[in-house]
Amino acid sequence: DADDQDQYSQPGHTHSAASSTDIPQDQGSEQLAQNLASVLSASDDDVPDNVFEAAKQLLGSQPVNSYDENVHMPIAMDPDLNPTVGNALMNKVLGNSGKIRASLQGLVQSSRYDRPVNKRSGNRIDGRKLSRLVQGDSRVFERRNHKQAPNTAIHLLVDGSTSMADRAPNNPNHSLIELAMESAMALALALEGISGVNPAVTRFPYLGTNNVVPLLKHSQKVRLNAPKFAPIVSGGTPLHTALWYAASSVLATREERKVIMVLTDGQPDDLDFTRAIIKRCVATGIELVGVGICFDTSHLFDRSICISDVSELRSEMFRISRDLLLAA
């Protein structure tokens, strides 16, 4: 599908971005978001010098931190394609994905309307309350308040560090990265089936660097990108730079709510840098969720779940999704 291909990964393609100081005030945020969107998949030579500055501006009006000069926007690298593995993974997770989707759709539908309230005027009479008229109580009209549908961009960050090659404690035939990939695909499939939800999936790092590997970009379809979901591991856990990429990605989407979910087995390479970018994301309105793969992540994320099998995603996601998908 030509519309589903990476439009920024062509060799030699150059992207330009106006300096933020030249952008009119009323167009600043929109232009910065466009700048970010234009480089999220650029090659190393294509990234404009001021992209990181644009990201920092969009991530809230925070004071410049001492570590900023040492943190660089990661490059989006092309993933290896393995149709056999990807399609097998797709077939494996369809059952769990369908259950998650049904559960979340039920939650969304049941929450679209408040409990009915009886009023003295309206267009719909509540037959169960007609007896009130005998007592002079005219509150027999039923009124329901329609709630806003989901309008959320969710970016799943998958930890692909070498420690993720370890066996799952409760399932020695399953590695942590296999569990993470199954979970990410199942979640993305479930979420893309819910109107108003726009998922993406990115694995990190790329070959031991601080770069990232987009597996599914916002507005793309999971099935067409299944060959990218290979359980590959390398390097450490540069979560701080991966969060920069995910934050820039969700900020470039049209959805009002922005969520980053991190699927990981433990500690990032640099805890201070990671906590600093998490704080900056939160200050900008980006919501973060930790999905611990057999390990607790509550030391990093105020909102977190822990799973040891894909089958646990349904109940755990249901527990936190009311806040993630539904308007306050």
Image (cartoon, helix red, strand yellow):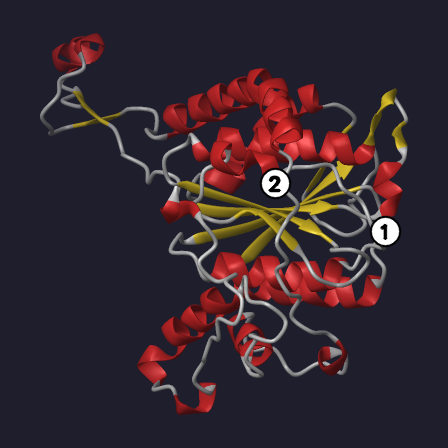
- Can you give x and y, in whole percent of width and height, for residue 313 in the image? 65, 26
SS state under label 1:
loop
- Can you give x and y, in whole percent of width and height, for residue 263 in the image? 71, 42
- Can you give x and y, in whole percent of width and height, for residue 262 in the image? 68, 46
Viewer-nearest of discs 2 and 1? 2
Residue 117 lies in what quarter of the image?
Answer: top left
Q: Which residue is mark 1?
A: 267
Q: Quick check: 166 above or below 29?
A: above
Image quadrant holding the N terminus, namely top left
Q: In the image shown, does 117 or 4 lie closer to the viewer?
A: 4
**Residue at left 13%, top 17%?**
125
- Can you give x and y, in whole percent of width and height, for residue 165 in the image? 86, 37
Q: Residue furthest front?
A: 11
Q: Which residue is mark 2?
A: 228
Q: Is residue 283 left or right of residue 32?
A: right
* Residue 77 is at least partly visible in this image: yes
Number of numbered labels in the structure image = 2
Image quadrant holding the C terminus, namely top left
Question: Mark 2 and mark 1: span between their CA atoms?
Answer: 25 Å
* Residue 306 is at least partly visible in this image: no
SS state under label 2:
helix
- Disc 2 + disc 1, Cβ < 8 Å: no
Q: Is residue 206 left or right of residue 76?
A: right
Kind of residue indicated by mark 2: Lys
User: Residue 4, labelled with which disc?
Assistant: none
**Residue at left 74%, top 55%?**
206
Kind of residue indicated by mark 1: Gln
Disc with the residue nearer the chain's start (2 vs 1):
2
**Residue at left 41%, top 69%?**
34
Q: In the image shown, does 318 or 294 lie closer to the viewer?
A: 294
Q: Is residue 222 left or right of residue 124?
A: right
Q: Quick check: 269 above or below 97?
A: below
